[in-house]
Image: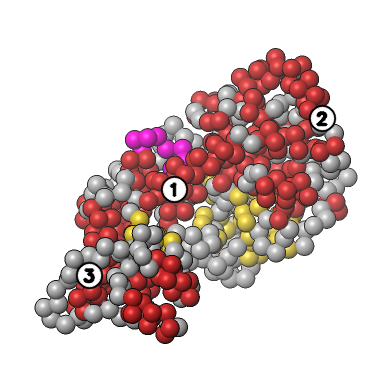
Amino acid sequence: MDVAHLLGPCVSSPFLSPSPSPFSGLPGLRIQRRRAQFRTTRRLNQCLACGAHTLVAGSEGSSQALRGEKAAEAGDLKSWLHRHGLPPCKVVLKERPSHDGKHRPIHYVAASENLQAGDVAFLVPNSLVVTLDRVLGNETIAELLTTNKLSELACLALYLMYEKKQGKKSFWYPFIRELDRQRGRGQVAVESPLIWSESELAYLDGSHTRAEVLEREEGIKREYNELDTVWFMAGSLFKQYPFDIPTEAFPYEIFKQAFVAVQSCVVHLQNVSLAKRFALVPLGPPLLAYKSNCKAMLTAVDDAVQLVVDRPYKAGEPIVVWCGPQPNSRLLLNYGFVDEDNPYDRIVIEASLNTEDPQYQEKRMVAQRNGKLAVQVFHVYVGREKEAVSEMLPYLRLGYISDTAEMNSIISSQGPTCPLSPCMERAVLDQLAAYFEARLAAYPTTLSEDEAMLADSNLNPKKRVAVQLVKLEKKILHACLRAIFDFTDQLPDNTISPCPAPFAPHLKF
């Protein structure tokens, strides 16, 4: 999208123009010479990076300089936007207190007047939106890097960290200052579990989300180790920050905090090029709250990003947008909140055929014919637990078939797996019930204990969102058990389950 006409004669773009391909201009000897020549400068930069010159520093003490600013700061971001091309809009920035007295209040976007569904709340010109093609100075390089090396989030975080080091000289200073205030906190003022302490992560014991947090952190570490590649490949970054090699300018913990801050506010735009699909929109999240049952989205239109509301608002009410079809585990990981009314909430179950089964290849063929894999992931959505159990049963039944003639009959039938005898069917249901009971037993608390904790108004906010998450997971697991018991009740009376089949499918715990 062409943004040149949106930049007035007195407003120059903060980005450098695209440079020639960096592949031909960075021989290894030249790079090594630069690294040696400016070693002292880089050490100084690294020290500065640990203080107030780094995006979202780990301590509130790094924001001491901001504490003395006037209370009118809430309007600073919006005033800056208007000065640089934001057209008149129907929103204001308001403030709510943080749960922690050490942290500053967080801002949010609210309606400045009564709105009706279909109204345009605001329209932000592309000149005020940070996208990857402009950050890296070249759309081809942007697509290459994010395809082969790094995520868009890592590249955007790196750019904002560099810009933060420029202080007030940076065009983006008001926006970055707002991100520092928000500190990667979502709408309930809770940070992503990616920056929780070890003791706080224990709130997620029993939930698969804890493993997802650790896996995501490992991914961030891998991306951190690739940052120098971005710096050398992106001509604009190399020219703009010639002495600041990323891994020497920014310690890993600082990068992770910046990554989490960007993760909490990045917008995924539709119907744009790959290099523009992830954007940082100054009036977007986390100033806008996410809601799972909302339909309003930030969308790319012509040379801007706009928000059309999907419901009426009274003046002063916070405006919400859709967060996409994300389960609560992802909402907590990305944005630090849990949505009790999330229709997309789910748990994941991984089942796999037994590779030691003599008929493994035949069973894998039957599974593939019915749209399943040898290692199959089943999504159990809230409110649709019985349907999910029904979908799993034919897959599990395969493991209980041992008779060659019966297997050949199934192969030739070209249909789903035939029902087993009542006794074997009970064995399948018993295996599935034991799996769900084991998952429930892995949590250190019961569902009733979770409800009691949530009734405490003084509950630590991080623990509150963690307890909300595990409570909703347990409700899905209990609903699965009820569905299994319903299927079991349909079996003939006095049906006895035989010993488990020696080659029953594995259910990953």
Find residue 234 and report its horizontal and vertical position in percent.
76, 39
Find residue 456 and report its horizontal and vertical position in percent.
26, 48
Q: Secondary structure at mark 3?
A: helix
Residue at image position (40%, 66%) is 360
Residue 304, by quadrant, is bottom right
Residue at image position (26%, 50%) is 442
Compare residues 174 and 23 and report the one nearer the observer: 23
What residue is disc 3 on?
A: 427
What residue is disc 2 on?
A: 27
2 or 1: tag closer to the N-terminus: 2
Compare residues 272 and 348 and report the one nearer the observer: 348
Alpha-carbon span between mark 2 and mark 3: 66 Å
Q: Which residues are magenta?
A: 189-200
Q: Residues within 10 Å of mark 3 (few under 14, many from 20)?
A: many
Colour convention: secondary structure
Looking at the rendered structure, which numbered label has been put on residue 212?
A: 1
Residue at image position (37%, 51%) is 208
Residue 214, by quadrant, is top left
Q: Residues within 10 Å of mark 1 (few under 14, many from 20)?
A: some
Find residue 81 and report its horizontal and vertical position in percent.
71, 47
Residue 89, compared with residue 214, is above or below; it is below
Could you tell me the amino acid type at mark 1?
Answer: Glu
